[in-house]
Image: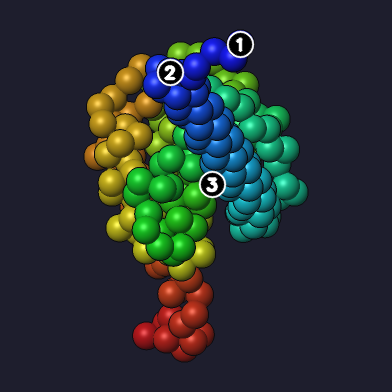
Amino acid sequence: MARKRSSGDGLGWVAVGGLALAAVALASAEADRQRQVRARQQLREKELEDARAFVYATLHETCRAFGIAPVPLVFVEEGNAASDGHRVYVNLAWFDDLLTRHCGESACTMAVARWVLAHEIAHHVHRDADVPLWVRNSHGLELRADYYAGRALAHFGAEFGVLDGVLREIAPFPTQTHPAFHARLRASHDGFRDYVLEQAFRAQPAHALTT
């Protein structure tokens, strides 16, 4: 004899169907989330790839301005930027974050990138990593590197003013190895000014130099 179907049986099927639909919805939402995560990862990888290419190109361009062969470049995951006299090290995440927060246009991005890399190239050219530790901690080598970085900015026709905010962040106060903001800005400005004056002097006609 067939059992009479009760109203409770219908409610049970409705509940089961509702759970199935919820499971499908959750699975679909999770699949969408994973697609979005992968898309963000791919975008970030592309951005980092572009950033690496930009740093390489800027480094080579700055080396040409110094009249030297391209310095070997190594990307690291800690610190910021440095030179050991044999290669230049750049933390790409730090570099990218610095440019993103301080620059909203390509001219600023190029100027800051050139200054940072020129500073490290100056350390490389002068083999600063090979000098005694007490000399390295005297701030003089850092200020000399800042001076040459300022000259590089002038060489490329960059605006000097973009350095203000960057140096305030990089060197808010003096440390054992690095001077504070005002000294570094002054050294960079001296390099910038000297380069501009030298170029203006060379551009003068010969007769004007004796009158």
Q: Position of residue 49 (x, y in %)?
A: 65, 46
Vertical relation: 95 (above or below) 100: above
Instruction: Indicate the amino acid at tag 3.
Output: Ala
**Of residues 93 and 189, which is closer to you in this image?**
93
Q: Position of residue 61 (x, y in %)?
A: 64, 57
Instruction: Indicate the amino acid at tag 1.
Output: Met
- Say whether residue 57 is visible: yes
Instruction: Indicate the amino acid at tag 2.
Output: Ser
Question: Which mark is drawn over residue 1?
Answer: 1
Q: Nearer the viewer, mark 2 or mark 3?
A: 2
Tag 1–tag 3 contact (CB < 8 Å) = no
Tag 1–tag 2 contact (CB < 8 Å) = no
Quadrant in the picture for residue 108: bottom left
At horizontal 30% and vertical 58% (from top left) the residue drawn is 161
At horizontal 42% and vertical 86% (from top left) the residue drawn is 208
Q: Position of residue 136 (x, y in %)?
A: 48, 21
Instruction: For label 3, count other residues whose C-alpha is less than 10 Å away and answer few (under 14), some (14-19) or many (20+).
Output: many
Give SS at disc 3.
helix
Residue at the spot of label 3: 118
- Say whether residue 63 is visible: no
Q: Is residue 71 left or right of residue 179?
A: right
Counting residues from the start of the chain, the first of labels 1 and 2 encountered is 1
**Of residues 16 and 191, which is closer to you in this image?**
16
Instruction: For label 1, count other residues whose C-alpha is less than 10 Å away and answer few (under 14), some (14-19) or many (20+).
Output: few
Give SS at disc 2.
loop
Residue at the spot of label 2: 6
Q: List the single residue furthest toward the front.
A: 1
Give SS at disc 1.
loop
Counting residues from the start of the chain, the first of labels 1 and 3 encountered is 1
Counting residues from the start of the chain, the first of labels 2 and 3 encountered is 2
Quarter of the N terminus within the rendering:
top right
